[in-house]
Amino acid sequence: MAYFLFFLGILCLIVLAGFISGSETAVTSASRAYLYHLAKRGDERAKKVAALQENLSTSISTILIMNQFVLYLIPIASTLFSVRYFSAAGGAIWQTILVFLLIIYAEIFPKMLVIKFTVPFTLFVGPIIFRAVKILRPVTAVLESCAKHTLKLIGIEANRSYISEQSHRELRGAIEMHSSEGDKEEAQKKSMLKSILDLEEVSVSQTMVHRKNLKTINVALPIEQIALELSSCPFSRIPLWKDNPENIVGILKTKTFFRALQINGNDWEKVKIQQLMFPPLFIPETKHLLDQLQDFRKKREHFALVVDEYGDLKGCITLEDILEEIVGEIEDEFDAMTEGIKLQTDGSVVAEGTTPVRDLNREFDWSLPEEEAATIAGYVMHEVRKIPDIGQIYVLSGFKIEILKRQRNQIGLVKITPPPKSSSSM
């Protein structure tokens, strides 16, 4: 009977070691997003697991302490068992069998089981580990302190910004992983999700309408002339300038102007532009789109003028521009593609020099660098360090770029041939 109880006790310790080992895998591999969803719906077990993942270092330390304690007891019990009931040869065979039992049932089997039933197992062990973390907190704190000081001695320090950046990359990886190849609808969803993540990294200078394409009106013009300009303009807000086009003194809403004209019985003399326009909102070109989107919401504005470090006008950005960064170009059924871009039958693309690099990357899922220049013309000139001539061909970042048109010192049209897609097979 004592023999059986001894053997049963060792088996129980192996099962306990497997349970603790599986708990470690469960806590680290469970989907944070799904657990957050369950926690928001009121699942108390999910809340506990989420708390464990929030402080993962302490959770893992607690699990390892428990696991090491059990693994410390197993060889002691096994040695006593073999000395009492086996000969020297029998004891050696028993220890060998025990090693295999530990590898299979304390490591491999529980981890395979957890991977198969991650969420149910995690929700089951979560409250248990949560309680253990509280009980062993003093011990864990001492051991973690020793580990952190050791890391500092060898020049390594915990960096929460790196953890945040890693989570950001994991989210991007999840978006890429869960998109179906060749499915246009899934590709569009993927592009939108990635664009949302990009908002905090993309500056307004990469998305703005350049001042060259900015429609402005001289505030000193007669009212009749201003009305004519507004009637032929497709925009709802027009910057007004005084003395020189870069001296923007106000923003005029087309709707406000014509409403005032109607109220005054179409009497031009009674319409005062100075009373209708409102102060312009100036923002730096380095501002990120996410910050600007939040400012638009906070200030209830839809339009801002972009200036450089010297205060010179660079262009404008609207709420619609930022929204199009997420959903893509808003086009009607007759527009086959983003304006200024034409796909050729050989797979190459002919694009105007003013085409934003981000539009090309979004349209064709390319990876042209976006950091150094906003437009494809700017990117080419930045890379080649000169204004290229018509007919010159460059290979930049794997893309073959041919200059088709040049107007004075500006690149007017380019032909871009993407690198061939490499297919990898196992």
Image (cartoon, rainbow, N blue to C red):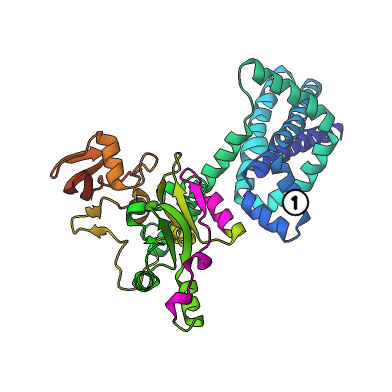
Give SS at disc 1: helix
Pick whichever, 157 or 67, lies toward us.
157
Instruction: Answer left or right for 148 relative to 423.
Output: right
Depth check: give the residue in front, 132 or 79.
Answer: 132
Q: Residue lying at the far left in this picture: please name it.
A: 391
**Is residue 111 visible from the viewing direction of this image?**
yes
The magenta region covers 267-296
Look at the image and say whether residue 380 sits in the magenta stretch: no
The amino acid at mark 1 is Lys
Position above or below: 157 against 323: above
Q: Residue furthest top?
A: 153
**Which residue position holds label 1?**
47
Residue 358 shown left or right of residue 41 in the figure: left
Give the image location of residue 405, x and y in percent: 17, 50
Q: Residue furthest bottom?
A: 265
Image location (x, y in percent) of residue 70:
77, 30
Which quadrant: the C terminus?
top left
Q: Is residue 220 above or below residue 61?
A: below
User: Label 1: few (<14), some or many (≥20) within 10 Å?
Assistant: many
- Image coordinates of residue 204 in percent, x first then y, are 46, 49
